[in-house]
Each structure stands twice: as structure tokens, then as C-alpha cells.
Image (cartoon, grey):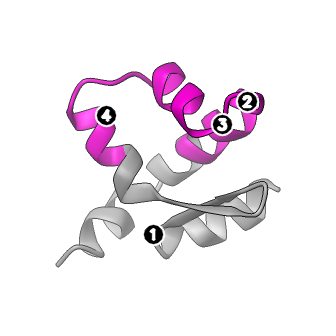
Amino acid sequence: MFQSITRHAITGEAVIRGTQIPVEFVIDMMREGYEFESIAKVLIDDHESDALEAMHCALLFPEAVLGSRN
């Protein structure tokens, strides 16, 4: 699962349980002051650990995420 999330994070999307969540959405929420745990609960109530793993993985590639906006 970690590898598939990494692959999609580089393209700007994290895939959790078959749902595509834009990594930019996570980055924007963090810039607004939300913490990982809060974002995870908003995204996936009962799979918090999967959401956290996806977000951590996506944030390993901030250049790819931020670069995709240009």
C-alpha cells in the first residue's frame, strides 16, 4: 500500500481505499492550521491510520506537489 500511495502522491493524488484525495487539499488544510489528525478524521472516519500514512507519504514529496501547481 505504501508504494502505491507514494506513486500517486508524486502525481498529486493519494489513493486511500479506492478514493482519490488530492494531495494539494491536504497541503492547503495544513497551511490553514489544521493538524494531521483533524484532516484524517475529516477524510476517513474509520480508517484514520490509512489517511495519516497517505498524508505523511505525500508530504515526503512537497516539491512534486507544489510544482504541480505551476
Quick one: SS at disc 3? loop
Residue at image mark 4: 30
| Of callouts 4 and 1, the N-terminal one | 1
Question: On the image, which quarter does residue 68 sit in?
Answer: bottom left
Can you give x and y, in whole percent of width and height, for residue 26 in the image? Answer: 40, 45
Local SS, label 2: helix
Q: Could you tell me the amino acid type at mark 3?
A: Ile
Q: Of marks 3 and 4, which one's residue comes earlier in the chain?
A: 4
Sequence order check: which comes first, mark 2 or mark 4? 4
Disc 1 and disc 2: Cα gap in Å?
A: 20 Å
Residue 33 is one of the magenta-drawn residues: yes
Give the mark, 1 or 2, whose residue is nearer the N terminus: 1
Q: Say what amino acid the circle numbered 4 marks.
A: Met
Secondary structure beneath label 1:
loop
Find the distance from the CA under tag 4 to the CA under tag 1: 16 Å
Marks 2 & 3, CB-CB < 8 Å contact:
no
Q: Residue furthest right?
A: 1
Indicate which disc residue 44 carries.
3
> Range of the magenta residues?
27-55
Residue 68 numbered tag? none
